[in-house]
Amino acid sequence: MGQPHGDELAHQGGRPASVLLLWTTAPAFIVLGALLHKRYYAHGFTKAQEGAGRTTGGRGLDLTIGKLLSGLTASKREFILKDLRIFFRDTQQWSQLILLAVLLVVYLSTSSRCRSSPRKRRRFPW
């Protein structure tokens, strides 16, 4: 007999090693998550509460777009800047913009195909 090889290693005690890995990986990650939570959660929560009143960076966008909108009144300019800040913060609006862009591309590509095709009277079934 010598050292176990190949399939002998995979089936120790009649159970595949993959089943053993399946049953030990999830608990190992739960323990790892609990240890990371214990170490970092309180510090991160405290930092989040302390930083709630102040802003971090982000003024570059306000200044750049503010210069582009300098022809507007201050209230209109601030309204547009507030809208942009909310847009970049809310990911749900990103998906809506992506959907709108895709629909616009489909519309433009379809309309350009219709214009490039010769003018024929087509009968549509509806």
Image: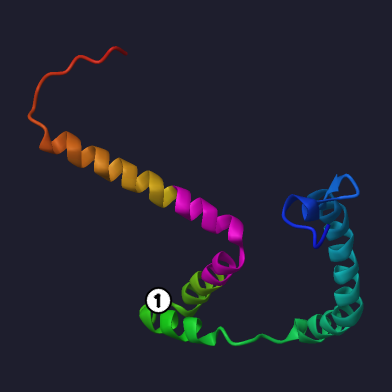
What is the quadrant of residue 34 in the picture?
A: bottom right
**Closer to the camera in the image, 64 or 103:** 103
- Percent from the top left, x then y, of residue 45? 85, 79
3 left or right of 89?
right
- Percent from the top left, x then y, of residue 67? 39, 84
Q: Quadrant of the N terminus?
A: bottom right
Q: Residue sitting at 35 percent across and 47 percent down?
A: 104
User: Which residue is labeled 1 in the image?
Assistant: 72
Q: Quadrant of the C terminus?
A: top left
16 left or right of 117?
right
- Percent from the top left, x then y, of residue 107? 31, 41
Q: Where are the magenta residues, as a range?
A: 83-99
Q: Is residue 101 magenta?
A: no
107 left or right of 123?
right
Q: Tell me the amino acid under the disc marked 1.
A: Leu
Q: Residue sitting at 42 percent across and 79 percent down?
A: 65
Magenta region, main secondary structure: helix
What is the quadrant of residue 5 in the picture?
A: bottom right
**Closer to the camera in the image, 7 or 62:** 7
88 left or right of 31?
left
